[in-house]
């Protein structure tokens, strides 16, 4: 009897040792994992522009006229992220320019191409606040030739349409937004500045049929673009082809 009790006690003690070691290992793994930095979810404020039936229909007409496609809806498969500046130093003015469905009367440079107002999926204020203006996978009019495959990110700034004056907060937000979009849409291949859009004519993504419909752009500034690209180098996003 004593011998049996001895073996039972020994067995129980062995089990307790194994259980203790297991708990310790689990705790060690837990603490090891908790040392990794936790990325907070990207904060995006919803601030929709006017995008009713009239704008949808004008978008379809734009696609038909400029890209030669008759579509049932304006959904896109994102393949490019295009960064911009608004050439306005004020958020309200920038938003109000994008908000109406029809193009404002002072945009004579592009009015002949369509009455559809310019737009973008996102607008980033100078304090870094990110606003979503419309569904990410709906076509916006923000870049000639590439609207049907791109997501546009406007940044409040670019005084005189030439000053490379976007803020450090905007830089941080653009970097985070690029990472968010690439993770959400693995189809995205390119990251370009608006000033580089004509270099994309050398790719199959270029769709513009009107050879006379081109504009000269400086946004979002070469330094800003360089800094964003450097920060997201690990995403391996393509730059536009050289030579134009």
Image: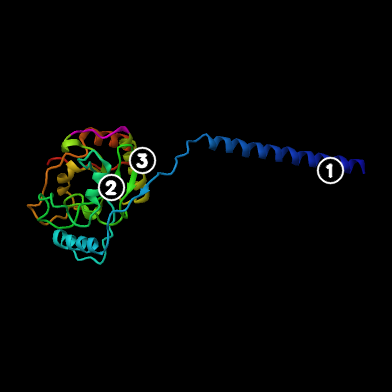
Instruction: Residue 59: give x, y in percent of width and height.
Output: 21, 60
The residue lying at 21 percent from left, 33 percent from top is 164
Magenta segment main secondary structure: loop
**Seen from this angle, which residue lies furthest right?**
1
Region rendered in magenta? 163-168
Is residue 166 highlighted in magenta?
Answer: yes
Q: CA–CA distance between discs 1 and 3? A: 60 Å
Q: CA–CA distance between discs 1 and 2? A: 65 Å
SS at circle 3: helix
Q: Which residue is mark 3?
A: 176
Q: Are marks 1 and 2 in contact (CB under 8 Å)?
A: no
Q: Are marks 2 and 3 in contact (CB under 8 Å)?
A: no
Instruction: Residue 136: give x, y in percent of width and height.
Output: 31, 53
Above or below for 155 versus 132: above
Q: Which residue is mark 2?
A: 189
Front label number (1 vs 2): 2
């Amino acid at each position: 009897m004593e011998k049996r009790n001895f073996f039972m006690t020994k067995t129980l003690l062995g089990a307790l040792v194994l259980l203790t070691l297991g708990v310790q290992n689990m705790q060690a793994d837990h603490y090891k994992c908790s040392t990794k930095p936790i990325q907070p979810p990207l904060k995006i404020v919803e601030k929709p522009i006017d995008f009713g039936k009239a704008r949808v229909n004008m978008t379809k007409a734009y696609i038909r006229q400029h890209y030669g496609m008759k579509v049932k809806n304006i959904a896109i498969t994102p393949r490019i992220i295009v960064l911009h500046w608004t050439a306005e130093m004020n958020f309200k003015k920038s938003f109000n320019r994008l908000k109406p469905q029809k193009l404002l009367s002072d945009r004579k440079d592009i009015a002949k191409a369509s009455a559809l107002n310019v737009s973008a999926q996102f607008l980033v204020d100078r304090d870094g606040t990110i606003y979503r203006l419309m569904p990410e996978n709906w076509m916006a009019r923000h870049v000639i030739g590439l609207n049907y495959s791109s997501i546009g990110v406007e940044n409040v700034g670019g005084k005189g349409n030439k000053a490379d004056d976007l803020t450090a907060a905007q830089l941080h937000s653009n970097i985070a937004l690029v990472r968010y979009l690439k993770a959400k849409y693995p189809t995205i291949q390119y990251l370009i500045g608006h000033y580089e859009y004509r270099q994309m004519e050398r790719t199959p993504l270029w769709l513009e049929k009107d050879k006379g419909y081109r504009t000269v752009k400086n946004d979002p500034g070469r330094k800003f673009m360089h800094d964003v690209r450097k920060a997201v180098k690990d995403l391996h996003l393509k730059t536009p082809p050289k030579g134009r």
